[in-house]
Image: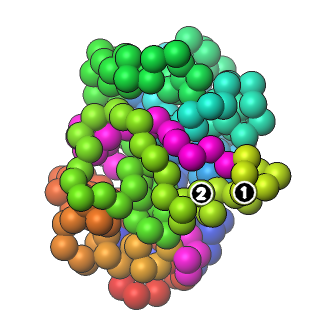
């Protein structure tokens, strides 16, 4: 495990972008695992700037997103499909058919989870997977639990996660209560994992993930078992290390 501490969000975003860019430059048909939320926004912005300078192409790249809300179709402004298109995919030359995100309105959610898991196996392994972390230690939408769920699955979101995500919605009532997420085995199957965390609100989860015992009560702690993981943190997120 490697832990890199930067001064601020912009430096975290810059280094994360360099990891992504270097992966694609070294392997033009790379498979990327991508997150959503506020943390990776800076990374995506810097990668887009690099693309616009004609320094990188995504024509042969495949992407898998970590998760999607249940009940939101791909055109809903709060869906992760919409987020990815608005903040990344529509700005680069990636082929839409090579971008995979769970279907949040699938008629059969169990079938959708199995389909997504099989796609990861068929198109993978993921060369580099970027993660964020919740204040409660969740990665993807793998919430604190009594066990590690290995494969892509349906999850009921905790009140803490619903509250944290409410800033992206008009009110608490409109925040989805369930999601589809990659499981822990799916995440750990990536060749390289990069965890991004900024802000004091993430500091306790980061401490427990890096130095605590490996437990499903702190999902991020499972990253201790991966042989190629890098934490990129700002000083606030690393305050307890």
Residue 205 lies within the magenta run: no
Residue shown at 41%/36% (left/top)?
Answer: 154
Question: Is residue 12 at all visible to an observer of this figure?
Answer: yes
Residue position marked by numbered label 1 in the rendering: 172
Horizontal and vertical percent for residue 55? 62, 33
Horizontal and vertical percent for residue 113? 38, 25
**Boundaries of the magenta span:** 175-201
Residue shown at 44%/23% (left/top)?
Answer: 109
Q: Quadrant of the N terminus?
A: bottom left
Q: CA distance from mark 1 to mark 2?
A: 8 Å
Horizontal and vertical percent for residue 157? 49, 51
Q: Quadrant of the C terminus?
A: bottom left
Question: Is residue 56 at all visible to an observer of this figure?
Answer: no
In the image, 159 versus 33, the foreground residue is 159
Q: Is residue 76 above or below residue 221?
A: above
Residue position marked by numbered label 2 in the rendering: 162
In the image, 212 versus 26, the foreground residue is 212
Residue 180 image label: none
Give the colour scheme shown: rainbow
Reading the chain from its start, which is encountered first: label 1 or label 2? 2
Q: Residue furthest top?
A: 97
Secondary element under disc 1, as helix, strand or loop, is helix
In the image, 222 versus 239, the foreground residue is 222
Label 1 crowd bin: few (<14), some (14–19), many (20+), radius 10 Å:
some
Label 2 crowd bin: few (<14), some (14–19), many (20+), radius 10 Å:
some
Q: Is residue 7 left or right of residue 149?
A: right
Q: Is residue 186 left or right of residue 199?
A: left
Q: Is residue 92 above or below residue 158?
A: above
Q: Circles 1 and 2: CB distance less than 8 Å? A: yes
């Amino acid at each position: 495990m490697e832990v890199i501490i930067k001064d601020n969000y912009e430096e975290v975003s810059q280094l994360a972008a360099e990891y992504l860019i270097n992966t694609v430059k070294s392997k033009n048909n790379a498979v990327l695992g991508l997150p959503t939320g506020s943390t990776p926004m800076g990374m995506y912005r810097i990668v887009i700037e690099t693309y616009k300078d004609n320094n990188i192409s995504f024509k042969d790249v495949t992407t898998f997103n970590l998760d999607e809300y249940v009940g939101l179709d791909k055109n809903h402004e709060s869906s992760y499909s919409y987020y990815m298109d608005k903040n990344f995919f529509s700005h680069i030359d990636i082929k839409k058919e090579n971008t995979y995100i769970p279907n949040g309105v699938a008629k059969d959610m169990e079938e959708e989870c199995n389909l997504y898991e099989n796609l990861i196996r068929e198109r993978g392994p993921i060369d580099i997977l970027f993660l964020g972390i919740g204040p409660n230690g969740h990665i993807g939408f793998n919430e604190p639990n009594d066990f590690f769920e290995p494969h892509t699955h349906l999850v009921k979101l905790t009140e803490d996660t619903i509250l944290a995500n409410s800033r992206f919605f008009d009110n608490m009532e409109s925040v989805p209560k369930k999601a589809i997420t990659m499981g822990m085995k799916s995440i750990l199957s990536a060749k390289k994992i990069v965890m991004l965390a900024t802000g004091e609100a993430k500091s306790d989860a980061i401490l427990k993930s890096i130095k605590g015992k490996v437990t499903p009560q702190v999902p991020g702690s499972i990253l201790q078992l991966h042989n190629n993981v890098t934490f990129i943190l700002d000083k606030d997120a690393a305050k307890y290390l």
